Amino acid sequence: MESKPKIFAASGSLPLAEKIAQAYGTKLGKVELSRFSDGEFQPCFEETVRGAHVYLVCSTPPPSDNLMELLLMIDCAKRASASKIIAVLPYFGWARQDRKDKPRVPIGAKMVAKMLEAAGATRIVTMDLHADQIQGFFEMPVDHLYASSIFVDYIKDLQRKGEIKDLAVASPDMGGSKRAYSYAKYFGSDVVICYKQRKKANVIESMTLIGDVEGKDIILLDDMVDTAGTLTKAADIMMDRGACSVRAMVTHPILSGQAYERIEKSGLKELITTDSIALKNSSDKIKVLSCAPLMADAIKLIEDNASISAKYIL
């Protein structure tokens, strides 16, 4: 008898997991999270998972409680005899630590990968990793999805409405140039690159614009926005250089520190993002597009042993 997949959510990703379950056509599994007075917690599945394909939805931004809760849920499913344990991480946290860029620092992304393996995960589903090579840190299948399938439709809609007339695609740094070129090739538009030098983490020393933005409607692309320093500085420079409008499309809205304040005061017309991480505050400038249908489609394809490459439109 074939087992139906069961979808469960960690406490920090509950709203997104409910949307994924609804898009898939099933109910979200019940999990009870017991908390001790010292901060320790213990998840418990309120239904059997024996022989089931268990999907655990949990984005893992800091604090580390999010990651720890996922690890405990994986161990819980393993000890309850689940046949497959698929960790669904819409946002894979600690991904900026993907290499040794100076002496005596950890490779945090690989350590997280090994922890997920050791806990008992058998497959990973994630979206827009900070660096594609992180997939190689895992000794298990990784289904790496891209938010481009969500963002491309939104750009087309803006073009139909006449809100974008002369499109140019921009990257806020050299590392995102590949992403920008992919979008530019798809839309047949110009590319603009921002060259930045960092003084330290989250602090930009200088930024230079490569490309013409005058009279253009700019789409700034990035995989994540943290303090929004880079995006807002790039948007302000572009508006000063004569751009008609600047919108940012960012997959993961970390939005820490003064991010919301910077976005409100910046030249950004709009920040389009996904619900891979729940927003802490609301803003008229922030538009959220759900990644739940994309995640649900990926689960269906995994269950059918079908290819997910149809989801790659760029």
Image (cartoon, rainbow, N blue to C red):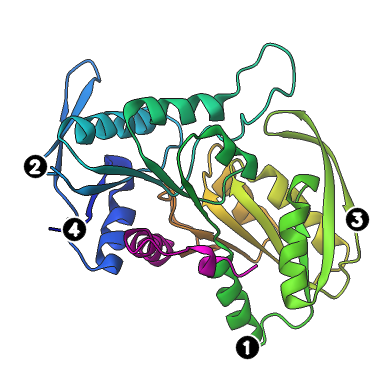
- Measure how far apart labels 1 and 3 are at the Cα level: 28 Å
Q: Earlier in the sequence, mark 1 or mark 3?
A: 1
Q: What residue did someone put label 1 on?
A: 160
Q: Nearer the viewer, residue 177 or 208?
A: 177
Q: Residue furthest front?
A: 1
Q: Earlier in the sequence, mark 3 or mark 4?
A: 4
**Quarter holding the N terminus?**
bottom left
Dot 3: few (<14), some (14–19), or many (≥20) neighbours within 10 Å? few
Label 3 residue SS: strand
Look at the image and tell me whether residue 137 can be seen.
yes
Using the image, tell me which numbered label, if any, was put on residue 210. 3
- Measure how far apart labels 2 and 4 are at the Cα level: 17 Å
In the rendered structure, which amino acid carries the disc numbered 4?
Answer: Lys
In the rendered structure, which amino acid carries the disc numbered 3?
Answer: Ile
Label 1 residue SS: helix
Instruction: Tell me where residue 216 sits by quadrant.
Output: bottom right
Question: In the image, 189: left or right of 19?
Answer: right
Q: Magenta stretch mostly in which secondary structure?
A: helix
Camera-near label (3 vs 4) is 4
Residue 143 belongs to magenta span:
no
Q: Earlier in the sequence, mark 3 or mark 2?
A: 2
- Measure how far apart labels 3 and 4 are at the Cα level: 52 Å
Q: Residue at x 60, y 72 (%)?
A: 152
Report the number of numbered marks. 4
Label 4 residue SS: loop
Percent position (x, y) of residue 78?
23, 33
Q: What residue did someone put label 4 on?
A: 4
Q: Earlier in the sequence, mark 2 or mark 1?
A: 2
In the rendered structure, which amino acid carries the disc numbered 2?
Answer: Glu
